[in-house]
Amino acid sequence: MKKEIVIIGGGIVGSTAAFYLSNHAEYQITLIDNGQGTATRAAAGIICPWLSQRRNQDWYHLTAQGANFYLQLMKDLSQAGMEQLPYHQTGTLVFKNQPHLLEKLYRLAMERRQKADMIGYLEIVEEENLKQFIPVLETQQGAVLTSGGGRLDGSALLDSLQELFIQNGGTIIKGQAQLSSKKTVLINHQELSYDQVILSAGAWLTQILEPLGYKVDIKPQKGQLLEVTTDFSTTQWPGCMLHGEIDILPFEQGRLVIGASHENNMGYDLEVDEQLITDMKTTASQFIPSLENYPISNTRVGIRAYTSDFLPFYGALSDQPSIWVASGLGSSGLTSGPFIGWQIAREILGLENPFDMSPFSPDKYITK
Ligand SMILES: Cc1cc2nc3c(=O)[nH]c(=O)nc-3n(C[C@H](O)[C@H](O)[C@H](O)COP(=O)(O)OP(=O)(O)OC[C@H]3O[C@@H](n4cnc5c(N)ncnc54)[C@H](O)[C@@H]3O)c2cc1C
C-alpha cells in the first residue's frame, strides 16, 4: 500500500516538497491550499543573498545555499519538460548613497565570492555608467553589480511545480485544511488520514497548530507591491535594490515589479492600500522618471512569516515526528524556500541531506 503524505500550504516550500516527493511512486501525495495571501505569489522575486549585510551566519549559509539550489531546481524542471523557466540570472545592482558604503559592500561581496562562485562578476558601477545597464535610470547613487543575481517569477514557479506534481500523480485540493489530533486532516468535510504531514502554511502555521495545544513563535508581516507595464526593453536589465525599502525588478516584456512594503501590526490584512502603492511608485519614479507615463497594471499583497529572532525553522516536531513544519522564512523565503522544501522531501524519503538542518530546528519556535 502507498504511504499517504498530506501537505498543507502550496507556497514555495510546500510546492517544491510536493514536486520532489511525487517523483517517488511509493507515496500518495495530496497538496492542500486555500489560495489566500500566498507570500510566494506576491513576492518581488529577488534572489541575491550575497550582498546582504545581515550578520547572522546561519541565515547567510542557508540563503546562499538556497540561491545555489536554483541551478539544480531549474535543471530538474527542464528535465521534467518545462520549457519556460521562471528563474533567470540577469544580475543585481545594489545601490548605496555614499562611496564608502559602496566600497564596504564590494569588499564584503569579494570576500564572500571565495566560497560562492555563483556571485559571478563584481563591479562598482559609478552613477555615470549605470545607463549602460538601465538606460532610463536617473540617479546620483552608485551601485555594486553582481552578475549572479537572479530574478524569479514566484507565481510561474508555483504553477510549474504544481503542474508537474499533478502529472506525477499528485492531487491538489483547494480549501481550508485543519489538523486533527487523530493523524488526520480535515478538508472540505472530508477526513484524510496521513503517514506524514507537512505544514508549509507560511504565516498561518500558528492557526493550524494552536488547536493541538502548541504555541508557535510566528508573527505576520504584510507586504505589498505594484507592477507597471512599460515599453522598455527590460528582458536583460538587472534587478535594482535601491537604498531604502524600494526595489525595482524588471521582468520580460517591459514589466517592472516595484516594492515591497514591510508592514508590521497589520495582522493578516490583505487589503490593498492605494496610498501606499502610489507612494511606492512615486519613490521609484525618482530613479526612473519616465515611469510617470505608465499606469499601475497590477498590485499584489502577501503575508510574510517572522520568528522573534528572524530565522526560519523547518524539520519534524520532536514529540510528533510524523508532523513536519516549515515557516518563518521572512523576506528571503523565495531564496531559501525551494532548498528547504527539497530538504524536507529528502528527509521524508530517507535520502542523504548534505545540509546541517540543526540550527533551524523547530523545537525552539514551537512549544507545548
Ligand atoms: C511583498 C513580498 C515581497 C517579497 N519579496 C521577496 C524577494 O524578492 N525575495 C525573497 O527571497 N523573498 C521575498 N519575499 C518572501 C517570500 O515570498 C516568502 O518568505 C516565501 O514565499 C514564503 O513561502 P512559504 O511557502 O513559507 O509561504 P507562502 O508562500 O505564504 O505559502 C503558504 C500557503 O499556505 C496556505 N495556507 C495557510 N494555511 C492554510 C490552511 N489551513 N489550509 C490551506 N492552505 C493554507 C496559504 O494560503 C499559502 O498559499 C517577499 C514576500 C512578500 C510578501
Image (cartoon, helix red, strand yellow):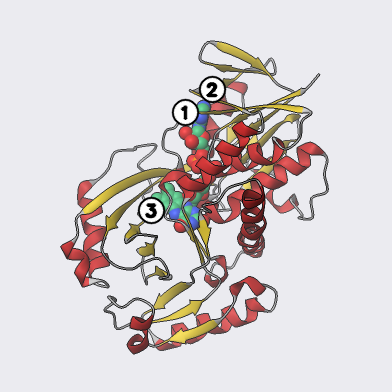
Q: Earlier in the sequence, mark 1 or mark 3?
A: 1
Residue farthest toward the left in the current orientation of the protein: 293
Q: Amino acid at mark 3?
A: His
Reading the image, the residue beneath label 1 is: 34
Element carrying mark 1: loop
Reading the image, the residue beneath label 3 is: 262
User: Along the line of sight, which residue is nearer the eye, 39 or 293?
Assistant: 293
Reading the image, the residue beneath label 2 is: 177
Tell me, yes or no, whether the two marked residues, 2 and 1, touch with CB atoms within 8 Å.
yes
Q: Earlier in the sequence, mark 2 or mark 1?
A: 1
Q: Residue at x 54, y 22 (%)?
A: 177
Dividing the picture into quarters, in which one does residue 41 lie?
top left
- Gap in Å between the C-alphas at discs 2 and 3? 27 Å
Q: Earlier in the sequence, mark 2 or mark 3?
A: 2
Dividing the picture into quarters, in which one does residue 212 lie?
top right
Q: For ligand 1, tell me if the residue under mark 1 lies within 8 Å.
A: yes
